[in-house]
Image (cartoon, rainbow, N blue to C red):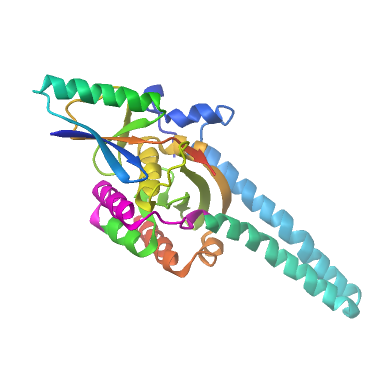
């Protein structure tokens, strides 16, 4: 089971869960992913120790996709 | 150290909001470090010169000399203090979100980093530019005997207060995806000798700086 989460005021919120075999869950996850991108979030996938990747499409084979807010100099 | 080639797709999206800044590289960082050193020298040397000349001209001017020496000491110290504030902790969220966010952060880092964060609030992250110590509202970059202090934070246009673990995780994920981009987006608040920053840090955070400094020394 893969998860799409958003870091927010609650710690994090699970936006969608899917398995590649379940087309309906994939469709819902893709829709949730696009909604988050439209809100201005940035999608990240951890790539092992010390590495992360910014993704623009929902990677269906990843176990965890994290949506974060943009950063800015303080 | 050569600049890492980052494909356009891998660059931080936030770079678009600071399009006028040249992308940070190791060479650019060294130049900025040198500029900070020159600025410090430019602040210190005239005051020290005034102090020496005044007391040579007339011992009666000793109080003026002492005041000049105090300025020579205080001005760099104030800059270092401003730099050290990037590691400050922000107001925590309520207990539930804090616990959830720390769980997610814990999943992103190894056990050593998790432990250091629990004691100091800072997460160590090795990079090409040096070793980073990532906090809630900024990061320290430790390179040899030098520390640069970067002010950067997660934005939240909807006003929801992010818990501390999420603030760190935001910066950590951005740093891991594009280190030079991260240093471009962040504002450099101070760059100077490690000891200057260390003495301005809260005591519990000095341990984090000592830990990454000793690792850097060992690997050098």
Does A24 appear above or below B78?
above
Q: Quadrant of the C terminus of chain B?
A: bottom left
Residue at 81% from the left image edge and 70% from the top image edge: B52
Q: Is residue B55 left or right of residue B75?
A: right
Eyeballing the image, is B156 above or below B94?
above
Q: Is residue B187 left or right of residue A65?
A: right
Between B117 and A29, the residue placed more toward the observer is A29
Along the viewing direction, whichever of B186 and B219 lies nearer the viewer = B186
When the figure is inspected, residue B182 is found, relative to residue B191, above or below; the finding is above
Q: Is residue B192 visible?
A: no
Query: In the depicted view, which residue is nearer to us: B16 or B156?
Result: B156
The prevailing secondary structure element of the residues shown in magenta is helix
Q: Quadrant of the N terminus of chain B?
A: top left
Which residue shows up at 28% across the image and 57% down it? B114
Where residue B207 appears, x then y in whole percent?
Answer: 40, 66
The span shown in magenta is B86-111
Q: Is residue B92 magenta?
A: yes
Would residue B139 be counted in the magenta stretch? no
Q: Residue at x 55, y 38 (%)?
A: B28
Can the viewer see residue B31? yes
Residue A38 pos. (x, y %): 39, 23
Residue located at (82% from left, 72% from top): B65
Measured as percent of width and height from the top left, residue B167 is found at 40, 47
């Amino acid at each position: 089971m893969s998860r799409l989460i958003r870091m927010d005021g609650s710690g994090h919120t699970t936006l969608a869960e899917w398995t590649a075999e379940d087309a309906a869950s994939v469709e819902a996850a893709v829709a949730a992913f696009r909604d988050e991108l439209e809100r201005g979030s940035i999608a990240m996938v951890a790539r092992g120790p010390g590495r992360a990747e910014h993704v623009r499409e929902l990677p269906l084979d990843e176990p965890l996709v994290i949506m974060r807010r943009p950063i800015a100099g303080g | 150290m050569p600049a890492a080639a980052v494909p356009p797709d891998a660059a931080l999206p936030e770079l678009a909001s600071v399009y006028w800044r040249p992308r940070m590289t190791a060479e650019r960082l060294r130049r900025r470090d040198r500029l900070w050193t020159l600025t410090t020298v430019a602040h210190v040397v005239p005051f020290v010169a005034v102090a020496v000349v005044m007391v040579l001209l007339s011992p009666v001017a000793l109080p003026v000399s002492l005041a000049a020496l105090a300025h020579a000491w205080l001005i760099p110290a104030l800059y270092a203090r401003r730099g050290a504030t990037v590691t400050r902790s922000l107001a925590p969220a309520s207990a539930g979100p804090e616990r959830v966010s720390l769980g997610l952060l814990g999943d992103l880092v190894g056990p050593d980093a998790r432990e250091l964060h629990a004691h100091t609030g800072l997460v160590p992250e090795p990079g090409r530019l040096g070793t980073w110590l990532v906090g809630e509202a900024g990061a320290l970059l430790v390179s040899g005997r030098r520390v640069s202090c970067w002010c950067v934070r997660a934005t939240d246009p909807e006003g929801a207060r992010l818990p501390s673990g999420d603030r760190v995780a935001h910066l950590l994920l951005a740093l891991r995806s594009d280190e030079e981009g991260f240093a471009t987006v962040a504002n450099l608040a101070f760059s100077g000798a490690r000891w200057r920053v260390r003495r301005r840090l809260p005591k519990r955070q000095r341990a984090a700086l000592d830990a990454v400094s000793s690792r850097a020394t060992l690997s050098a």
